[in-house]
Amino acid sequence: DRSGVVYQGRTEGMNPWKQKYARHTTLRTLDEALDGADIFMGLSGPGVLKAQSVKKMAHQPLILAMANPVPEIMPDEALAVRPDAILATGRSDFPNQVNNVLCFPFIFRGALDCGASTINDEMKAAAVRAIAGLAEKEVPHEVAQAYSGETLKFGPEYLIPKPFDPRLIEDVPLAVVKAAMASGVASRPIADLDKYRRHLHGFSNRSGLFMQPCIDVAREHRARIVYAEGENEDVLLAVQSVIDEGVALPILIGRPEVIRTQIDRLSMHIDIGRDVQIVNPEEADSHPEYWQSYHRIVGRQGVSVEAAQTAMRTQASALAAVLVARDEADGLICGKVGAFADHLRTVRGVLAGGDDQQHVSSLCALLLPEGPLFIADAFITVDPTVEQVVETTCASIEMVRHFGITPRVALLAHSNFGTSQAPSAIKMRQAAQILRERMPNVEIDGEMHSFTALNEAIRKTTLQESRLSDNANLLIMPNIDSANITLGMIRALTDSLLVGPLFTGFAKPAHVVIPSVTSRGIFNMSAFTSAEIHRLRERNT
């Protein structure tokens, strides 16, 4: 304390509580006590710890200077005399901020969820271990973005997760609940801990509950998914989650030495060979079957033998598509690096079945506070025909159902139930009629305004016998411009989260992500692709 070492026989400033910690020792000052010490933990006041005392501490001393707002010693002062020191303070402007927001909310969450009669040491220790474990894991994309400029890799400057790491709400309460149950203080034990973990995951990951039906299927039937940009950081972070969650068997296209360097830099625990397979494009020449397969498919699209050989070395999306076409992978994900249109053109060339490409379409899901809203087709067909609108709608309805959601479909136009005879209005009107005849058990209506589709009161005053029982959740647009503009405007003006684009109509499952996609978005696409592959297998057996 402020008077020095608390020792047996001391009288100055002593009380019954301090007496519990009195030691038999000849040491009398903090400076003496720190000679050879491994750890300093301060909960006192500014300037208590002096630089000359820090010099005397053991190799790589751990200094926990918790006084706020000014710690017992400033980190730069300690590091000036002991560059090997590891420091933590209560301040956010230095590495390793110790903040009670890391533990208290989540300890209470776990204690309340299992009806703990007390918060015991076992529960506290479990929370500490869970927090410590997070620091050693790779940092999620959201945290890395929020703390751009900092190196968030386990080490002297990153011993503790950041206070707003979204994984805390999942890992810490779960650990606390397990400890409460094991120590016998949980009055409402949680029988299904996996279900509880998924429930917690929903607090931190807005897409978690939405994606859960696909994740559940993917876990049961893991498919081989090839990732064209296997060297990319976000792709690798997603692949780590894919491995941890067990939703797919990843195949990475990239140079092995670059991938290993990235894995080490990101402190990931991916085991090459066991967890992932690597296809090295630089060795494509030693696999002539790849360029031969590629040329066989696209040779009549103006691709020469030499161009096919070059593509296998230089176009990762083309190589990924060939692996899928040859049944060496079940599905592919590409697009994180490079132009979206180039990736799409490459994949279509290999997997869209020659000239019959009109049936390929895209669907995007926007996760809004009111619920998910699906939009088609913002990426593929510029001005679809009536039959293409019908095919896109049918495919979109099936995909919406994959998420455990009942589709309510509105075909949109500038016309509202026959108010215009313009070609685009007639197209959507005719498509709606065909769809109602083909799918009488699905809620489909149109053509209508977007405001009508999303406002029940307006819909009732416009057409009382509308087939929609509630607001539409699947919007089919008349052309690519209206779909893409609508998608972009909603994303810009709301706090929505994009899932997709999801593609349908390829010969085998393939998805091109947009370059801005996060690692979580790539994980979501992986789960969807793996589940999609299983459903296609079931349908074909």
Image: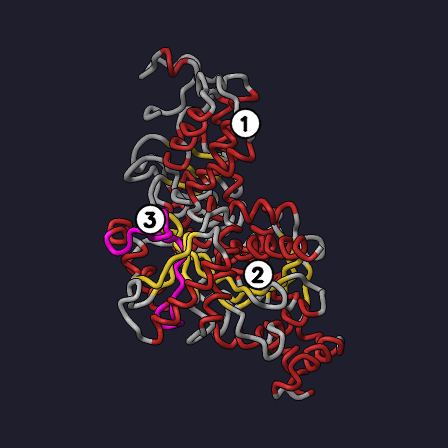
Q: Secondary structure at mark 3?
A: loop
Instruction: Tell which of 310 and 60 is nearer to you.
Output: 310
- Crowd band around label 3 with a 10 angstrom C-alpha radius: few (<14), some (14–19), many (20+): few
Residue under pointer 1: 178
Can residue 271 be seen in this snapshot?
Answer: no
Disc 1 versus disc 3: nearer the observer: 1
Residue 485 drawn in magenta? no
Residue under pointer 3: 93
Instruction: Tell which of 195 and 81 is nearer to you.
Output: 195
Q: Secondary structure at mark 1?
A: helix
Count of all numbered marks drawn on residues in the image: 3
Instruction: Tell which of 288 and 435 is nearer to you.
Output: 435
Marks 3 and 2, the one that precedes in the sequence? 3
Q: Secondary structure at mark 2?
A: helix
> Where does residue 306 sit, x and y in percent of width and height?
68, 88
Question: Magenta residues?
Answer: 461-482
Find residue 376 and report its image quarter. Answer: bottom left
> Where does residue 350 sit, x and y in percent of width and height?
62, 75
- Label for residue 262? 2
